[in-house]
Each structure stands twice: as structure tokens, then as C-alpha cells.
Image (cartoon, rainbow, N blue to C red):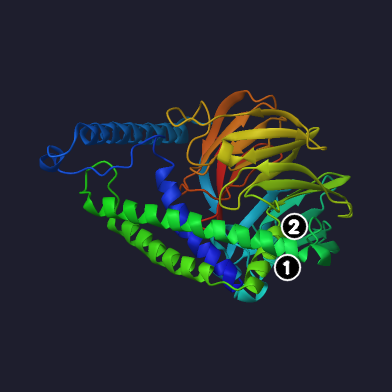
Amino acid sequence: MSHGATVVAYAAAAILAWFAYASRKPVEVPNVRLTPATEIKERTPDDLQAAENLQAAQAQYEEHQKRERESLDEFRRTSPYRQARTISVDTSSGKILGFCTLGEGRLALLTGAASPYGAARAKEDDAVESRLVWLAADGHEERAVPLDFVPRSVTAGPDGSLWVAGDASIAHLSTTGEILATAESPHFTLEPEGQEEFLAEAKARQEMQVVRCTEGIQRLAEMIEELEKKQEGEPGFQPQEVVARLKEDLQSGKQSIEELKSMPDEQIMEDELVRLRQIHRIAATTDNVFLVAQQPTGYGYSVWRCGSDLSSPVRIVEGLSGCCGQMDIQVVDGGLAIAENSRHHVRMVDIEGEEIRTFGERSEADITKGFGGCCNPMNTCLDNTGCLLTSESNGLVKRYSLEGEMQEVVGVADVEAGCKNSSIGLSADGSSLYYLDIHKGTIVVLEKAG
């Protein structure tokens, strides 16, 4: 990873630690500190009301958390798919970074060294070789092909060939592992005459990033201060190891901000190019390949459509809102399903990018009524009946019709919650549901009960 990219990754880690904590709380919670009753008596009526409001909000948050845990536990026991085993690779091969399902119970795996929050990385930073692996139903490797980039997304085309994307690279491979085509960031080029304007925009973005990072670090420091005062059993208490990790994030974030402030123009330009060239997701039909990347201005994501030879890129969707480098797209009948996680819905579009419908909303109180957490759903996939499965970062998988009607909770994988790639897939015969545990670098397998 470049120096600048490392700085951004550390800053993001600190800020996201705060957002992961804060976003779980109800909105419009006053930013006040609970104090002993003897101190509250000396405060104004407004202070007393603010403290009461915070206590009520904290109680509501704790109740939502309790209800979610109970619901997840119940669905683990009663849903159609129950966790049965995990799939992993030898430690010498790193971790599983992504996958897609193939026919006859087979999987295509991406393996290599993991990266925090989907940060871009240079290949020379990896001690573990990146690979594309064809995994047989019985678990043995049928074949493996080394990749000269760090992969993050793989999808199967209608003919069974595989498309792999990661960093700025795309590779198209046949069913036997032959490399059919490669390309570098087909969606993005910077002409010489546009470099001056590009640098000005990059510097403005960097200045805004410093402001946002500073605000996030300040909030993280306030949160740590609050957590250190809480005793076990009190609402919001966190174990000491959690607080220690947040303190490490705080120090890293402070250092990162100083490095951001002193970054030279050349580094700003390089990091901006890395950001825009990075491909976050890939999907394919017979005639087209679809790419997700960050858009040149603002902080959203866009979808580009290319020909099957990766020519003629056209941006068909823009302004998508996603967290932690995560914006999943899947080919569905007549178009694409986009898991727009920060807006808590699925957006259905045709191949021209025209919106067909959206469905879903944020729901903390009832996990069957919408999508919870700071940013869900994380990923989707089609099942063997033509319906859409959605995954959430807490392991929850649900089934929807393509018209957006919620049908059932399919299963719950036992994974650590948190904004992340939560890729899912269903075997062709519908007997096995797969869920990527990106933290452990494994795939959780849930088998159909009965």
C-alpha cells in the first residue's frame, strides 16, 4: 500500500470505530455526559432533561440490542438453513477474500492476504500469493491460478468463465483457468490536459478529509472517555480489550491526520488516482461487464457498463451510498440488484441504469421489517427459485421476491458483526447456503434442515 493509502486506512479505522458505535444508537441523542446524581442537582433544568433523554435513549438502545440478539438466536434454531461447518484454506495461502458459487456444489475462491476496510494495496506488500481457486464439492482444490493483483470480487459469467476484479485490475479466465483477457481500470482515464483540474479537486477532497477525520477523532476521544467511566453491568459498558483497541485507533488516527496535513501534491495525486482506479465489485452477462468504483467527485459509488471485451465503458448509475468500500451488485433477470447499504435498501435497475424499484428501510426494532445496523444489506445473490437473498453484517440472511416482498429469514451465520463484505451464495440444488466470514477469512456453510 502507498504511504498515503496507509494514512487513509488508519484514519478510516479510527473514524469507523466511532461510527460503528454511534450509528447503533437512536438518532437525535443529545451529546451529554451522564454524571453522578450529586452533580446533576447542581445543573440547570435543561441539563437534567438532557440527561434524562440520554438515559431513555440508552435504555431504548439496550432494548433493541437485546431484542436483536434474541431474534437472531431464535432464527438460528428455527430457520430453514442451520450452520453446519466452515470452509477454510491452509494458512500458507492466507485467507478467503471472496467467492462465488459454481455448479455441482463447487466454489470459486479468492485467497491471499487480507486488507483492512477494503483498502487498496500494492502487490509487493503481500507476503502471501493471491490466487483464484476452483474448489470441488468434496473440498479439494481442482486447480488454482496465481493472480498478479490483490483480488476482492469474483463472479461467474453465463458460460461458466470467471471474472475477477481487485485494485485496478480485471482478469477474465476460462473454466480451465486460461487467462482470456486482462485490463486495468477500463472505466477511468486521466487525460494530460485535465491533470491540473484533477489535482485541485484532489486537494479540496484531502482538505475536507482532514476536517472530517478530525471531527471523527474528537468524537472517538469523547466516546473512550465515557466508556472508561462505565462499570460492568451499566448500560453501554464495554470490555477493557475493546476500549484498548479504540485507544490504539485513536492514536493511529491522530498521527494519520498530521500526515494528511503535510502530504505533498504528488502524493495527493497518486492516492486520488489509486482511489478512482480501484474496482470494488464486478458482475457479468453474456454481452456486458459491470464494474463498481468510487465516483470522481463526492463520496459515492458509481456503476459502469462495459462490453464483454471491456471496451466502451459507460457510467450508468451514480451517487450510490455505501460504507467501508462495500457496494455489491449482482446480475438479476433484466438488470442489476444493488445493495445500497448506507441507505438500507436494495436498488433494482435495468442494464441502462434506469431504476426499476427500491425496497427496504432501516429497522432496529424488528429485524424482519427492514435492515438494521449502520449499513445493510451488505450483499445479495439469486437463489434457485429466482428470488433474491440479502445478507447483513450480523450474519442474517433473508429472502425477498424481486418485487421487494420479504418472504422469510433463511438463516443466520455465526459471525462477528460490523460493516464488511458479507458475500453469500446458494448451491444450485439449494441444499447449502454460503456466507463469507471476512474477519476469519473463512466461509460459513449453512445446510438446509430436514
Where residue 210 appears, as percent x and y from the top left, is 51, 60
Element under disc 1: strand
Q: Quadrant of residue 228?
A: bottom left
Which residue corresponds to mark 2? 164
Q: Quadrant of residue 151?
A: bottom right
Q: Is residue 422 above or below residue 271?
A: above
Element under disc 2: strand
Q: Residue, x 55% and y 42% (percent of image)?
A: 446
Residue type, label 1: Leu
Nearest the viewer among 299 and 56 is 299
Q: Is residue 435 above or below residue 30?
A: below
Residue 147: which numbered mark, if any? 1
Task: Please identify the quadrant where the N terminus is shown.
Answer: bottom right
Pick out the residue farthest to the left. Answer: 38
Q: Earlier in the sequence, mark 1 or mark 2?
A: 1
Is residue 267 visible to us here? Answer: yes
Where residue 21 appears, as percent x and y from the top left, is 40, 47
Mark 2, residues whose alpha carbon is within 10 Å: few (<14), some, or many (≥20)?
Answer: many
